[in-house]
Image (cartoon, rainbow, N blue to C red):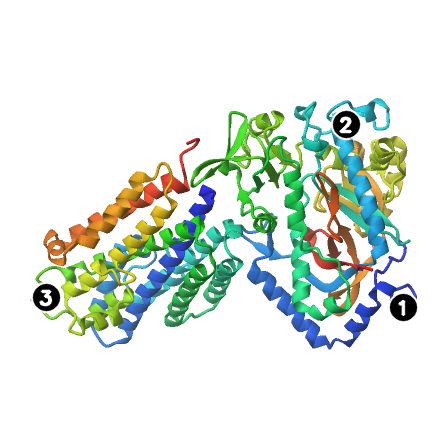
Amino acid sequence: MLSRTADHLYWMSRYIERAESLARMVDAHYRMSLLPHSPEELAGSLQATMKALHMEEAYTERHKTIEPKDVFQFVSLDRDYSGSIFSCLRSARENARAVRGSLTSELWETLNSTWLDARAQSARRSVDIGEFVEWVKERSHLTRGVTIGTMMRDEAFHFTRIGTFLERADSTARILTAHQSDLMPGADAGVVPDPYQWSVLLRALSAFEVYRRVYRDVITPSRVAELLILRDDMPRSLLRCCKEVYGNLKSVANQQSAETVRRAGEMHAILHFARMEELLSVGLPRFLEQFLAKLNDLGSRIASDFLVPPAEA
Amino acid sequence: MPNTPYNEMYFREGAGRAHYLRYSQWLGEQPADRLAQKRAEADALFHRVGITFAVYGQEEGSERLIPFDIVPRVLPHEEWIRLETGLKQRVRALNSFIHDIYHDQQILKAGVIPAEQVLCNSQYRPEMQGVDVPGGIYAHIAGIDIVRDDAGEFKVLEDNLRVPSGVSYMLENRKMMMRLFPELFSSHRVAPVDHYPDVLLDNLRSVAPTGVADPTVVLLTAGAHNSAYFEHAFLAQQMGIELVEGQDLFVRDEAVFMRTTQGPQRVDVIYRRIDDDFMDPLVFRPDSMLGVPGLLTAYRAGHITIANAIGTGVADDKSIYPYVPEMIRFYLGQSPIIGNVHTWMLRKPVDREYVLAHLAELVVKEVHGAGGYGMLIGPAASKEEIEKFRQQIIATPERYIAQPTLALSTCPTFAEAGLAPRHIDLRPFVLSGRDVTIVPGGLTRVALREGSLVVNSSQGGGTKDTWVLET
């Protein structure tokens, strides 16, 4: 398939996944904001999250203080901020429009009506943020379902999936980064962690119910880290995402991609055989930082091997 | 002022024409709210599917629907057969003309068309002189604009031989009608159109460079911001071919390749939807980012087919249009089946004198204008506008032609206040390759504003489904 087509498909799915991740993040904090607890804590969590997602600067250009209401509005609906959910939905649709001939009609229509709806909602005077992010998650589920349910299992599909899982790995790693101080070794023994904080983290990664099912016990930092990093059966864990990236990448391998595929395989293998104790002894912050750097490198390698090949290869 | 226009559905006395009887009876039985609901449904569907066109000169990224009217334009079988024969004849002659112009120029030597009219035309491409193209076909896809005058006669208003658009609306309009009113298709024998993409692909494959057994065909677009992008994406998808932009292609060793995720892949036929000027920055506009450097070299070497060929504009220019009936006589030895609209050429002093004295009655068009821009409609124009055109004509007469203000035929159409007659035209799409083929019908465009004669979508025109009835 055309490199440019693959590029648009890859970004289309990255943007949809990003919109969903942001919606989960907003949703978790929005719920927290409805419960009785200290406003500093909520603001602190929002600030750490925005920092990990590189959104802090754009936010402070617009607002002086961290007000949950402002943050929700900014992350969800800011039309001028390219990182908002609204902008992600627009970018997903623009990428889809550029290759609509390579999408099934159902997938194109899903993305197109998501965008048309988002635009209509954002034009209303007041938007219920809770409802909006719920709607975004539903549209993302629908998009993924239509992708899996209607697309041929060809290159187009694999590049779509690579985009989804690279983005998801990135998002999980960043949310973990925002909460890394709660996950440090020793945290288990120390003060009882704030249950709200945990629920924010777990809900942001759709892992709250899974945690209870898997551990049937109190929430401890090392288990949270294990669930979100090393569990193969947890759909948003780093291991799961890397496994999917590697698998899809193998299916599209070409003449120059051997090293890229190898690196993806290595990332998967390291997580697959890792033990939590070891990982914690290296230190979570360092591990996450390295992971994000490798992920970034993988993204650039995929771009130059497949999506935007250098001229006259 | 023009005479009373021909109404496609009713006789002047009000009785229905035979081929519309069943439809108008059905229409009379429909409750108003059902029709209103169907119109709203059509709008919503077109939006969701994204059948839109970008509007130039408006805020970036603005996309608009082309209004769709639910009353079909119906052509009886025998009228269509005559049109079809006439269209094939005309396009054959046009292809012969282009071939001749870029080879021996017999028609110029015979004095049928003044040589400077052709050779000094900005659309004449000296780069094409002596280049042989497969099958001698230049205009593989032609959109011929047909109008019906007040006497009920079909006339050719314009030939579009460069990158004619609109065929996707022909296909989508039919799909929409069948979805909205399936019952009408069981009570009418409407000739199908949905095989157009198959015919088009077959046609494109038939003109591949010699020796290529299984040609790779691609559609070249200017990209998602082009006004006809929906159509480009739609046709590529329907034909199952790659939709490429200039940046996706490159030329190596006089052959064209596309960049794919599995490395370079050879391309044999380019169905291009960008103008000559942008095709190859090494030959035409050097600032073009849309084309492919070196493409012309590959083309002249016969390693790639470009459809439509480079240089077809020399035959659809409004200054050449008046000579098409002569071409039919010259190349085919036949008399034209569909006539032209009478045209005054303002570079001729006699014509100019007449036109300047009758500006308020006539339509004046720029020779190179398109899309309904650069046009004066005398009866609808203000004194100032007429004066402005008069000055322009006097300054550069060769840039203009004039035609009588035609009473384009009308068809009942939904307007604000209900059903009312609106002016229409017809653009059938003529495909030339191994054979000449036409999918029955074409795109009917309708001027939605009362009294307006401009059907272009950029000027507030809409479209209708076009039915050719089978016997």
How far, Cα to Cα, is label 1 from label 3?
91 Å
Q: Out of B404 and B21, give the one closest to the viewer.
A: B21
Coordinates of residue A43 in the picture (x, y in percent): 24, 65
Q: Chain of mark 3?
A: A
Coordinates of residue A1 in the picture (x, y in percent): 47, 44
Q: Secondary structure at mark 1?
A: loop
Circle nearer the N terminus (1, 2): 1
* Cβ atoms under marks 2 and 3 closer than 8 Å: no
Which amino acid type corresponds to the residue marked 2 in the rendered image?
Asp
Q: Chain of mark 1?
A: B
Q: Which mark is residue A81?
A: none
The image quadrant that residue B95 belongs to is top right
Which residue lies at the image location 24% right of the left edge and 65% below the top edge? A201
Q: Out of B413 and A59, give the one closest to the viewer.
A: B413
Which amino acid type corresponds to the residue marked 1 in the rendered image?
Ala
Q: Out of A276 and A188, give the one closest to the viewer.
A: A276
User: Which residue matches tag 1?
Assistant: B15
* Cβ atoms under marks 1 and 2 closer than 8 Å: no
Asked if B294 appears above or below A220 in the picture, the reply is above
Answer left or right for A116 relative to B238.
left
The image quadrant that residue B421 belongs to is bottom right
Image quadrant for the C terminus of chain B?
bottom right
Asked if B362 appears above or below B189 in the picture, the reply is above
Which residue lies at the image location 84% right of the left edge and 63% below the top edge? B19
Which residue lies at the image location 44% right of the left edge and 59% below the top edge? A147
Q: Which mark is residue A188?
A: 3
Answer left or right for B299 relative to B387.
left
Same-chain status of marks 1 and 3: no
User: Which residue matches tag 2?
Assistant: B100
How far, Cα to Cα, is label 1 from label 2?
49 Å
Which amino acid type corresponds to the residue marked 3 in the rendered image?
Asp
Q: Secondary structure at mark 3?
A: loop
